[in-house]
Amino acid sequence: MRSQVYEYLRNELKAENLKPGMFVSMNQIMKNLNISRTPLRDALLQLQNEGFVTFLPQRGIRINELTQQDIEDLYEMLGALDSRALLSVFQKMGPSEIEKMEKLNQEMLENISGSKFNRYWDLNSEFHNVYLNLSSNLPILRQINIIRQRLFEFGKKDWSRKMREMNHAEHLAMIELIEKGEAVAAADFMRDVHCVINY
């Protein structure tokens, strides 16, 4: 149920029918998903615990906005978890994974313009999933997924073109470290450079 409600809200955000800070009514979700109030309330409370929404009885459900401090904190958490996951699967990475990362990063560059922004973020997730999918640490993967959803699905996507180009360049640097077999350097780069807000 949580995933069903999440997907509904995510699709509404993608379609720009909802934006962070806006309210959506429980009755509207119940009608659109054809579900009853009790399971919907349970799903919304779980989404609230994960930071996506705030459940306000009598008023509806507010899509949480991320403050600048929230964004910085989430990136710091993402860097710590993502670098640990990368380090743990490093020996499983070979030429096919590197080739996938290179192709995805190139496609990101081709979708860097504002009109293709949603595709850009999907490709960014696919890029990182190349190594994350090699991990069997389900608790870390779950937390990474929640953080990425909050930043990239429920958060504002207002990176400038310069920031997106910098993201592409950082991916190239990560790929180079992976190709050289420098596991610790790649993980450190992920944590201390790639997942640091520097704008």
Image (spheres, helix red, strand yellow):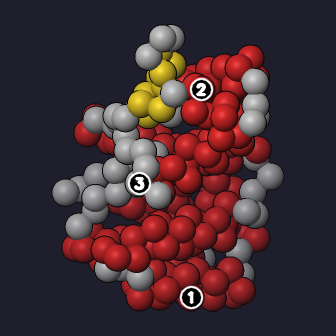
Question: In the rendering, at what x and y percent does residue 37 appear?
Answer: 71, 20
As drawn, the residue found furthest toward the left would be 199
Amino acid beneath label 1: Lys
Q: How much space separates mark 2 and mark 1, taking CA atoms?
A: 44 Å
- What residue did someone put label 3 on? 16
Percent position of residue 49, x then y = 57, 23
Q: Position of residue 59 (x, y in %)?
A: 44, 16
Q: Residues within 10 Å of mark 2 (few under 14, many from 20)?
A: some
Which disc number belongs to residue 1?
A: none
Foreground of the two, 145 or 44? 44
- Label 2 vs label 3: CA separation? 20 Å
Percent coordinates x, y for residue 33 in the rendering: 70, 40
Which residue is found at the position 71% from the left and 86% from the top? 96
Mark closer to the chain start, 3 or 1: 3
Q: Mark 2 or mark 1: which comes first in sequence? A: 2
| Label tally | 3
Q: Is the residue under label 3 in contact with that under label 2 (CB below 8 Å)?
A: no
Marked residue nearer the N-terminal end (2 or 3): 3
**Residue that carries the numbered disc 2 in the rendered image:** 27
Q: Amino acid at mark 3?
A: Glu
Mark 2 secondary-structure assignment: helix
Residue farthest to the right? Answer: 136
Q: Which element type, helix, strand or loop, lies under badge 3?
A: loop
